[in-house]
Amino acid sequence: MTFDRATLPSLLNREQLEAVLHGEDPLLVLAGAGSGKTRVITYRIADLVRSRGVPPWKILAVTFTNKAAEEMRERLLGLLGEEGGEVWISTFHAAGARILRREGEAIGLPRSFVVYDESDQLSLMKRVLEAAGYEKRQISPGVVLRRIDAAKNHGLGPDDLESEDEADGWLVADLYRRYQAALREAGAVDFGDLLLRLFELFETAPDVLERYRRRFEYVLVDEFQDTNDVQLRLLRMLKEDGRGLCAVGDDDQSIYRWRGANVENLLAFPEIFPNTRIIKLEQNYRSTQIILDAAHAVIAKNPHRMEKKLWTRNGPGEPLGCIVARTEREEAERVVDRIRASLRRGVDPSEIAVFYRTNAQSRVLEEAFRLGGVPYQVVRGRSFYERAEVKDLVAYLRLAVHPHSDVDAARVINKPARGIGATTLGRLQAAAADWGVSLVEVCRQAAQVPGLSAAQQQRARAFADLVGRIALAAAEGAAGDAAEAALVLSGLEAAYLDEGTDEALERLENLREFVGAAREWDARHQPDPDDDVTPLAAFLEQIALLGDADDRVSGPKVSLMTLHASKGLEFEEVYLTGMEESVFPHVRALGLFGAPESLEEERRLCYVGFTRAKKRLVLSLAQSRYIFGELRFNAPSRFLSDVPPRLFGLEDQERLRPADLEEIDEVEDAAFDLDEDDGFEDDYVIDYAWDQRPEPRKRPKPPRKKEREAPALRAGMPARHASFGVGMIEAVDGDKVSIRFPGVGLKRVMIRFLEPV
DNA sequence: TAAGGATATTTTTTT
DNA sequence: AATATCCTTA
């Protein structure tokens, strides 16, 4: 597939075509869900390059997630071939990191700076609080960090906070200053800094700004409704008059207000940049009319929005589905049952998704999927790199690149245990504060530290030594070699092997997988001659910014994710779970807790969720659910009653009553023949479940595990199976039993999937 | 100093 | 329910 301008009219509708061919004046594309905005952006870039002779490296395309960037890059490669790879496509944050890496020395940022993620920030803030002499109980590091982060998103420094009317502004300002100083000492930046310090760079070094101004002749920004104030400021610096700037967005899909996103940026775009051409894309190519009507019914209740209504030629489609369960467990099981029915009908598992409001809801769902033997995949941003053992190894590697990173040093100084406990660490940290040097440096000069015994001095020196040796290995080789060296030299490998428990071996397995990921990265990335950064430093940056490298998923699977993670994706079948007041909309958006604006954001989130579905949308709820380990009874979500009953197939009714939902639910279950036995489970489902790699994080308590693994079962005993219900055992054979379920017939199933009655 | 148990605290969403 | 933190004991 290559690009040819002449074919565009046959590929695009009138508005899309206009957006693609539009000239240099600022352009704002208001693109409803599923209206083909990625298509517009990619074709516009292709047209700039092929028809208008713009060198690809003069184009910057900014996306909101790394996933979106990846997808766009692929599409461009398809349209433009190799040249497509020369377009700069990345998130704002990744672009910031890249520019700071090259130019940051102008504002005192070392070339090898590390990017701190949330947990790094937290440990740093804890240390800051301690050093500042605040009582631990009085100030929560998390709260302070949230305040600082909010300030950074608005482009505010400590001084700006001091003048705020908030009574504790001075306190936050004080901690903000100390926190920044600590980051600077560690040679680190946090997420907010990637933007804010870029701004600082452009302000202090006009020549640098000028270079990038000239370089980025065309800038395209996707998901513009979710940009924050600093991002807008950066754009205004790069494109003062807006010429060559194209923003694409949808105010109805703004769901990151809590992170500093400001819809006003989108609404005010035409005023900020004079001569803006506005193009609306309202034809939807993704969903059925029923799904669009449902989404519209929910979003229309928001007062402040640019009125637009999506339409489609796809036809009405089938009515919405509905599940009313008694408990969250039952909800999960019923969702899985319906999915199994769909799979039997031949729907591709990768075309099915289950959404939820909070990550915590995934646990029960995962269990149900595992028990039901349906292949699934949790789409989580960065779970792998958040595992404790992986973070440990990363800490060693970051120390190798940057020995000043005290957070990392403190993390691994006694990992594996090498006799440097809390007391010794405290003394070392005190000395580091006194002398104004890093923890590793203090360790090197341990003899000078007051109060250390000879043995402790020796251990501390050995640690400094270790860091040096890993650094040596890292300087020479690729990221993979460095990771391997860290794993072995640190003693982590030996310690896990020594421990020898299943858990330890699993952690070690994760670390080996990490080494593998590093090697794979080495193979795929040739060093950028511009950057003069070691492969290891580049790899570390990539894992700080980017999530799980787990996109090399094997085989088709059902996707589980939060509503936020679903943005930009589409599936034939979508299950939206937890449709209950105070789950969705979330408690914190309701009544006492939330401002009215947060309820509006929940509504937009619902709109986003609905519009992911192409053909079938099922809404589910549980009448009772454990929250914080406490049983709660929640009313059905207000979003359910916003949906006109006719969309559920109830023709002659004005309003939806709770009882109606249950009725629809029952009718549907019957329609799907959920009890049908067609051998599907045996061939596909159950075996698969047995293969599935266990989730490392979940380790059932030993007594329960035992019971699960080997219940004492004999012929004649009853047992319960998650999907088939209670049946009578007829024969036991190794780890399988033959068991007869009423209405299902005789089945051979793994004992593991049975529960005693 | 390390390990294990009791107790407090937490969860909205993520670059 | 699951974790982080504190506290006791060996």
Image (cartoon, coloured by chain):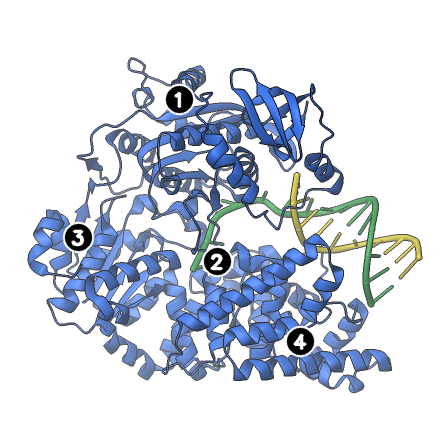
Chain colours: A blue, B green, C yellow
Residue furthest out toward the top: A652
* Residue shown at the point (41%, 50%) measured from the top left: A256
Q: Are marks 3 and 4 on the same chain?
A: yes
**Image coords of residue A332 (percent x, y):** 52, 31
Look at label 1 and name its amino acid.
Phe
Q: Using residue A136 as the reference point, say whether residue A648 is left or right of it.
A: left
Q: Are marks 1 and 3 on the same chain?
A: yes
> Which residue matches tag 3?
A278
In the image, which is nearer the foreground, mark 2 or mark 1?
1
> Which residue matches tag 1?
A672
Among numbered discs 1 and 4, the one appearing first in the sequence: 4
Among numbered discs 3 and 4, the one appearing first in the sequence: 3
* Residue shown at the point (28%, 15%) measured from the top left: A651
Contact between marks 3 and 2 (CB within 8 A): the answer is no
Q: Chain of mark 3?
A: A
> Which residue matches tag 2?
A548
Among numbered discs 3 and 2, the one appearing first in the sequence: 3
Query: In this view of the protein, which residue sits in the foreground, A739 or A223?
Result: A739
Circle 4 packing at 10 Å, graded few (<14), some (14-19), many (20+), is: some
Does residue A690 lie above or below A1 as drawn? above
> Which residue matches tag 4?
A489
